[in-house]
Amino acid sequence: MIRTVITPTNTNIRLSIPKEYVGKPIEVTCLPLEELEQNSSKKTMRDFWGVISDETAKILYEQVDQNRKEW
């Protein structure tokens, strides 16, 4: 995998790919980093309230609590 951050100086970017990628599907993504940073905000258990079942929430909470005790 190759991942890099660039700051373009115009609207064109030339992309060279490794020989082993030729003939294979690859993904090319272009987005400003500030969009990526906005979408990567940390989630808390509260963010999942009403999305997961009470039983699943209890299991997750117990796992988090156990991990904190082991830390």
Image (cartoon, rainbow, N blue to C red):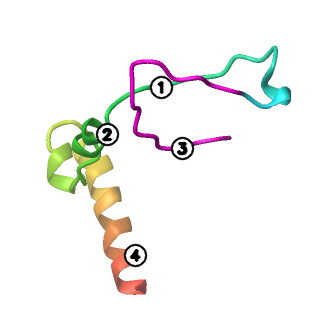
Residue at 77% x, 18% y is 24
Q: Amino acid at mark 3?
A: Thr
How many numbered dots are placed on residues in this image?
A: 4
Badge 2 or badge 1: first in the primary sequence = 1
Task: Determine which quarter of the picture holds residue 19.
Answer: top right
Relative side of 60 to 42, left or right: right
**Which residue corresponds to mark 2?**
36
**Which residue corresponds to mark 4?**
67
Rate crowding at label 3 as few (under 14), some (14 to 19) or many (20 or more) other CA atoms within 10 Å: few
Task: Determine which quarter of the picture holds residue 30.
Answer: top left
3D distance between C-alphas at marks 4 and 2: 28 Å
Q: Quadrant of the N terminus?
A: top right
Closer to the camera, 15 or 55? 15
Q: Position of residue 31 (x, y in %)?
A: 36, 29
Local SS, label 3: loop
Relative to 20, does residue 63 appear above or below in the rendering?
below
Q: Amino acid at mark 2?
A: Leu
Q: Are marks 3 and 2 in contact (CB under 8 Å)?
A: no
Magenta residue check for 35: no
Badge 3 or badge 2: first in the primary sequence = 3
Specify the segment rendered in magenta: 1-16
Task: Determine which quarter of the picture holds residue 26.
Answer: top right
Local SS, label 2: helix
3D distance between C-alphas at marks 4 and 1: 35 Å
